[in-house]
Amino acid sequence: MQGVGQALEREGFLATRLDAFVNWGRKNSLWPMPLGLSCCGIEMMAMVGPRFDIARFGAEALRFSPRQADLLIVAGTLTWKMAEVARTIYDQMPDPKWVISMGVCASSGGMYDSYAVVQGIDMIMPVDIYVPGCPPRPDAVIDGLLKLQKKIELERPIKRLLEDRSADDEWLEGHGRMFRQENQAVPQHDPSAGVASDEPRG
Amino acid sequence: MMSAEATAERVREGLAGLDCEALESRDGMTTLRCELAAVPEVAAALRDRCGFELSTCVTAVDHGMEREEQGRPRFDMIWQLQSVTHADRLRLHAWVGEELRVPSLVGLWPGIAYGERECFDMFGIAFDGHAGLKRLLMPEAYEHFPLRKDFPHQGIEPDKLYRAWDASRRADAGGAS
């Protein structure tokens, strides 16, 4: 035992929870997959550049393949035509994965209360952080990233691994349920409702 | 820029022998109306004899369901042409019949293909002779035509369409794993 004691004395050791250690690793090496759909994409690029520099938070490794990314940044207006593509990209990302909804268009459809635009990307995928703004400043998105890091700190990766439940499964049981099952009531726009129908939805 | 009179004169000479009616237009642009069946012939004459080398816009106007009930044509097709040589523009109108079929002008202006696809997407007007007539801006399985008058202005969400796609996607994923 004396040999072990001496070895520990010389080389040092660390005791921690595996959860905390995994979360620490994950939150400080987020690899974003940028999905720049409109003007928000420009602010997202500025965020990556040297002036704002998300490398300070370990998230500078932008991957243009969803297979290598774990953070999807949906930046801009998502149309129904594009929705299928966005969802496929989300599906192609390996777990663990997180989503930042950047700008009001991605978060709620924004000013595009129209037949062509998805009224919030949380209709088609789970979202971790919503960043408001039109477009949000790069530092606002960085603030979102820091909040996401705080959120990741609170996750229970080992429990999730044992239960084999992804964030998508959780979303499907909760918020996503109403959009993805035929028998559930979906918020519907009633064209016969007259003046009331002119009020913005949700 | 040619004066409106000069444009009208050139078009009158070029379309001699073809049945076309000149319309008043609020913006001063030379405007014609002809029978739908005569459109390919008139358009060819406009391109070859009047020098309208470009087709800048193809669209339609929905004049409302009441006209349909009265037995009058509901949709008005509009082609907008431009002459680079003479630096002027021209608009061609034609009423669309009940069957909502219009001859395609892809043979005259290949670039018009996208405009015709958009028109099909928004109004449901089919173009005879168009090789790839499918939706341009809306999802392909969408069932409605957004620029028609009976379409609610806030739209109809394709949520059913989405759920059908989602279900098949999840079935595929289940089968693969």
Image (cartoon, coloured by chain):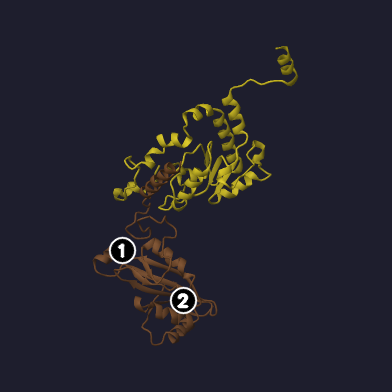
The amino acid marked with disc number 2 is Leu
Q: What chain is tagged by disc 1?
A: B
**Vertical position of residue B40 compared to residue A12: above or below:** below
The amino acid marked with disc number 1 is Gly
In this rendering, the label closer to the viewer, 2 or 1: 2
- Same-chain check, marks 2 and 1: yes
**Vertical position of residue A5 compared to residue B56: above or below:** above
Of pointers 2 and 1, the one earlier in the residue sequence: 1
Question: Horizontal and vertical percent for residue B29?
Answer: 45, 75
Give the side of residue A6 with respect to residue B169, left or right: right
What is the drawing colour of chain A?
Answer: yellow
Give the side of residue A47 with respect to residue B131, left or right: right
Q: What chain is tagged by disc 2?
A: B
Would you call the spot at circle 1 few (<14 residues within 10 Å), some (14-19), or many (20 or more)? some
What is the drawing colour of chain B?
Answer: brown
The numbered dot on residue A200 is: none
Q: Which residue is mark 1?
A: B64
Give the side of residue A57 with respect to residue A93, left or right: right
Give whichever of A104, A20 is nearer the camera. Answer: A20
The numbered dot on residue B108 is: 2
Separation of marks 2 and 1 at Cα, in angstroms: 30 Å
